[in-house]
Image: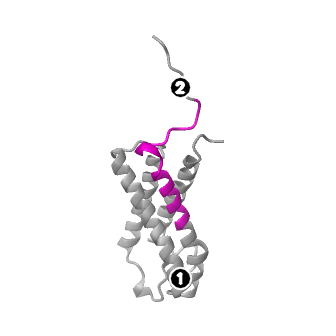
Amino acid sequence: MPQNPRRPAAAAAALVLAALSFLHLLWLSSPWPLTSRQRFLETVAGQTGPSSGPPPWMTLAVACLLAVAAWLILARAGFVRGFLPYRVLNVATGTVAAVLLLRGAAGLVLSGVVGQGPAPFRFWDLVLYSPLTLALGTVAALVTRDPAGRPLRPAGPPQARRSP
């Protein structure tokens, strides 16, 4: 069992965020995994008309923000070297957690209670998008709350002190 169970969770969350970032970059030129732009807009973007879809710059911005979120979680968990001071890294990772948790909760309310958006989007928002976002936000919050604002240490035996 790992010394700190938050490290594998942080690595998994960062991997998912990086994959989502790549997927947003792919969506700049393709409706994959759907067959048409119209079905993509109804299922993924929650829009009904082609003119109401998100502009490319917004999709690119989301891809960049997801990549930054993945890096922040990895840096806070001690997997990569962070160039930010620990307090700034904590605030940034806490902001990632808050944004993800807010998006997940809002998705459940808007798709489940209010019934906003096309039916395919509401279905996937309740089944996949919002729960995944809540899980990612929870991991980011747990990583942020690790003691003393210091990066987590890698699992392994403690180093023995050498005497002079």
Is the C terminus in the top left, top right, bottom left or bottom right quadrant?
Answer: top left
The magenta stretch spans residue 141: yes
The magenta stretch spans residue 131: no
Residue at figure coordinates x 41%, y 57% from the top left: 94
Residue at figure coordinates x 40%, y 78% from the top left: 54
Q: Is residue 118 visible?
A: yes
Give the answer, above or below, for where 45 lies relative to 82. Answer: below
Please, what is the three-letter code of the amino acid marked with disc 1? Ser
Give the answer, above or below, for where 27 lies relative to 112. Answer: above
Label 2 to label 1, Cα distance in Å?
Answer: 51 Å
| Mark found first going from the N terminus, 2 or 1 | 1
**Foreground pick, 112 / 64:** 112
Residue at figure coordinates x 55%, y 63% from the top left: 135
Q: How crowded is mark 1: few (under 14 residues within 10 Å), some or many (20 or more)?
A: many
Determine whether the residue tagged by mark 1 lies in a helix, strand or loop.
helix
Q: Name the residue under label 1.
A: 111
Determine whether the residue tagged by mark 2 lies in a helix, strand or loop.
loop
In the rendered structure, the answer to whether residue 55 lies left or right of residue 41 reads: left
Please, what is the three-letter code of the amino acid marked with disc 2? Gln
What segment is highlighted magenta in the picture?
A: 133-157
Residue 159 is marked as 2
| Image position, residue 7 (x, y; %) | 55, 47
Considering every residue shown, the one lying at the far right of the view is 1
| Image position, residue 78 (x, y; %) | 47, 43
